[in-house]
Image (cartoon, grey):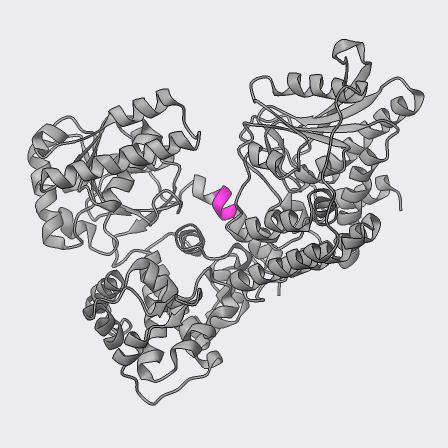
């Protein structure tokens, strides 16, 4: 079947494609080297709408290559290049089209279409060049891998092969070409490890250091410098040297390392990483066509899997729903924020101050109960800014500007008399927080918003003794503040629209994924995780061995086991939240006697790491008192998932969030729930837990899984 026939058939499956054009223009290279054809990929939209590849887009690229191929064979050009519109090279296949594929043959056609078009670049009679001028992902990276040479902009903010993260493989040449270009070890880092680490992105300099690009140029005149470099290469003045790829034992070791990384992250629960590693292993001999054929087969089978639907569902939550929070008031009601106050100067408060000054670039002032704490908090922020400077993330002028904006004083009147937004991050005790807000109301201007970073206490009760409770809003961050995107914005019983709109406006500037949450105990993430952790602790208390309870949930592919997560959160905090929820819902939330004993003993967790991996601390083992009810891993897993499904059903009935999608968005962005599962509610639907517990699915069939 011809490329045109493949693409025509695929286009019928994807009527709503945003079509990318491939514009060919000609220019004379510097120094009189000769005529050059430059193909620019552009979907005609602004830089917030990345260029993607659907079947009509591939047809346009194919037509552009037709023209370039003819010119190359006629000798009217000496080279050809591919670049993107400003700030964006291309971000790969449009997943909306892939989830429309219904048969294996259609899936195979999708893979072959990409291969057949991109391979033509390596088959031209002249050298080809990819100029990665901005964000490049998936198929955008892969079209460049088919070229003879590549340059990358130092300003490139995001470069990745994210397919494994989404439940696919880099199926248009990535699994085959990348290891043959930079070696299996580096390719495994990009294709497997980066993807499984929440789709970690490469910057332009890293792309060059890995050997993916042959040259690195600054963003301001990137294309001009790339063309000068191209002229030097074509003229023979510059030789591009690439190290030999080790095809011996190092290749096998890299694949084994990738399998270990996949096991650690997904525990065999998702096939994509393993399929990608199989292809990398198979192309050790350099047989590119065999690799392309294997990519086609893997891509076709994974396109038809629930993992792709789940990954696409999760991707849409993060990319779309997070940008349009359900229930958020009219953004025009938001008030300007020109100064921020932070009550507290401990670690969390200092992290918040750093985030606010970096994103808002307005004065930020901290207070605490003594000058030593205040000074320590300000020093922390200044030290973190110094680290950004050392890493070249900011320049000296920006460093000086940011540090000058962060101050600390003891007197709240001095600190907050002209603040527009004040957030407290003090001890998690209702009376303490009420006292703080009373002090703020006495000194802050009438328009100031009061935010609380509470993780479980009632925002309404916190505001209940104020003259103006309508300006109090929950603003719950997740630790580490700089890493986790989620921000639970909590509307108290009397919070008004202007305060809420201001909170959402601040969240946007902080670049956080904000979700509107009802003022209910522990809100969303902590309530679900506490129920989840509580059932694990219950089965341990009742007699199930710790190792069995931990292994029980490995098939979910969570980023860490329950007790390792508890260690990260802190056993004392975990105990405090479980006690808070027990007071609200004593029939469902228990307080583990063993967790209480661990906290009382001052232990930081259940494990030691002397051997490099978690092992039950003998001192903790001596503290445990267990019953004689021993469950299997399957019984434990069923019990835990049933409890979570019940709790989510109750939360939705209470109106804690607008829809199940908001539960999923919270867990993905605030708790690291794996993308390949698509979120907790589709996972519970696919496993039949939702219907077993609640009598119905959370989502309609086919929303995040293969239709039933």
Left or right, 563 with respect to 604, comes to right
Q: Which residues are magenta?
A: 316-320
Q: Nearer the viewer, residue 483 or 451?
A: 483
Q: Is residue 647 left or right of residue 323?
A: left
Residue 76 x/y as whole percent: 88, 17
The quarter of the displayed image where residue 229 is located: top right
Q: Quadrant of residue 423?
A: top left
Residue 365 image point, x, y percent: 19, 31
Q: Residue at x 50, y 50 (%)?
A: 198
Residue at position x 74%, y 29% from top? Answer: 240
Is any atom of residue 312 visible in this view?
no
- From the viewer's perspective, is 412 left or right of 565? left
At x 77%, y 32%, the residue is 148
Where in the figure is residue 238, as x and y percent of width and height? Answer: 75, 22
The answer to whether residue 659 is above or below residue 228 is: below
| Position of 412 relative to 701 (above/below) | above
Tell me what residue is drawn at x 51 percent, y 51 percent. 197
Tag count: 0
Within the magenta stretch, is there residue 232? Answer: no
Dominant secondary-structure state across the stretch colored magenta: helix
Q: Would residue 659 appear left or right of 531 to someone viewing this image? A: right
Quarter of the image containing the C terminus? bottom right
Q: Is residue 89 above or below residue 545?
A: above
Could you say which is closer to the camera, residue 117 or residue 322? Answer: 117
């Amino acid at each position: 079947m011809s490329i045109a026939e493949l693409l025509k058939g695929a286009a019928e499956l994807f009527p709503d494609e945003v079509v990318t054009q491939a514009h060919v223009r000609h220019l004379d290279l510097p120094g009189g080297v000769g005529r050059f054809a430059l193909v620019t990929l552009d979907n005609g939209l602004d830089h917030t709408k990345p260029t993607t590849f659907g079947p009509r887009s591939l047809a346009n690229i194919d037509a552009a290559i037709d023209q370039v191929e003819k010119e190359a064979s006629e000798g009217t050009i000496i080279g050809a290049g591919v670049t993107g519109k400003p700030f964006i090279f291309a971000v790969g296949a449009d997943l909306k089209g892939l989830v429309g594929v219904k048969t294996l043959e259609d899936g195979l056609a999708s893979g072959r279409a990409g291969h057949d078009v991109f391979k033509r670049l390596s088959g031209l009679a002249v050298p080809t060049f990819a100029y990665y001028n901005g964000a490049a992902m998936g198929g955008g990276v892969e079209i460049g891998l088919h070229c003879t040479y590549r340059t990358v902009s130092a300003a490139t903010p995001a470069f990745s092969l994210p397919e494994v993260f989404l439940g696919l493989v880099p199926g248009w040449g990535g699994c085959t070409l990348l290891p043959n270009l930079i070696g299996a070890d580096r390719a495994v880092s990009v294709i497997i490890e980066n993807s499984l680490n929440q789709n970690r992105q490469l910057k332009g300099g890293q792309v060059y250091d890995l050997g993916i690009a042959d040259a690195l140029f600054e963003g301001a005149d990137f294309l001009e410098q790339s063309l000068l470099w191209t002229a030097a290469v074509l003229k023979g003045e510059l030789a591009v040297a690439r190290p030999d790829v080790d095809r011996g034992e190092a290749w096998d070791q890299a694949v084994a390392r990738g399998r270990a990384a996949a096991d650690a992250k997904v525990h065999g629960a998702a096939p994509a990483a393993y399929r990608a590693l199989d292809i990398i292993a198979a192309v050790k001999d350099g047989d590119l066509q065999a690799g392309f054929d294997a990519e086609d087969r893997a891509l076709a089978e994974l396109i038809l899997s629930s993992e792709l639907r789940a990954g696409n569902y999760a991707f849409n939550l993060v990319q779309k729903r997070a940008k349009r929070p359900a229930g958020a008031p009219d953004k025009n009601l938001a008030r300007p924020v020109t100064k921020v106050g932070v009550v507290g100067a401990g670690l969390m408060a200092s992290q918040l101050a750093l985030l606010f000054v970096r994103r808002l670039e307005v004065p930020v002032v901290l207070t605490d109960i003594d000058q030593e704490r205040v000074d320590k908090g300000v020093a922390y922020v200044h030290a973190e800014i110094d680290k950004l400077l050392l890493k070249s993330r900011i320049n000296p002028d920006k460093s000086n500007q940011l540090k000058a904006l962060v101050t600390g004083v003891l007197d709240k009147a001095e600190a907050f008399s002209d603040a527009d937004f004040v957030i407290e991050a003090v001890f998690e005790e209702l009376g303490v927080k009420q006292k703080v807000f009373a002090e703020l109301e006495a000194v802050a201007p009438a328009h100031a918003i009061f935010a609380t970073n509470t993780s479980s206490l009632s925002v309404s009760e916190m505001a209940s003794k104020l003259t103006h409770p309508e300006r109090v809003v929950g603003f719950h961050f997740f630790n580490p503040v700089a890493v986790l995107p989620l921000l639970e914005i909590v509307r108290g019983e009397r919070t008004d629209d202007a305060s809420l709109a201001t909170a959402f406006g601040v969240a946007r500037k902080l670049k956080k994924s904000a979700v509107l949450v009802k003022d209910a105990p522990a809100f969303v993430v902590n309530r679900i995780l506490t129920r989840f952790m509580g059932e694990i602790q219950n089965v341990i208390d009742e007699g199930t061995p710790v190792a069995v309870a931990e292994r029980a949930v490995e098939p979910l592919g969570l980023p860490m086991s329950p007790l390792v997560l508890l260690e990260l959160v802190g056993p004392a905090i975990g105990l405090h939240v479980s006690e808070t929820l027990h007071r609200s819902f004593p029939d469902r939330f228990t307080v583990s006697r063993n967790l209480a004993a661990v906290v009382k003993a001052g232990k930081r967790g259940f494990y030691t790491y002397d051997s490099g991996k978690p092992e039950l601390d003998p001192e903790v083992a001596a503290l445990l008192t267990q019953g004689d009810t021993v469950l299997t891993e399957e019984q434990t897993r069923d019990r835990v998932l049933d409890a979570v499904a019940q709790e989510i059903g109750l939360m939705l009935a209470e109106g804690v969030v607008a829809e199940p999608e908001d539960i999923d968005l919270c867990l993905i962005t605030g708790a690291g729930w794996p993308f390949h599962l698509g979120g907790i509610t589709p996972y519970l639907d696919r496993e039949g837990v939702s219907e077993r517990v609640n009598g119905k699915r959370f989502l309609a069939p086919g929303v995040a899984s293969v239709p039933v």
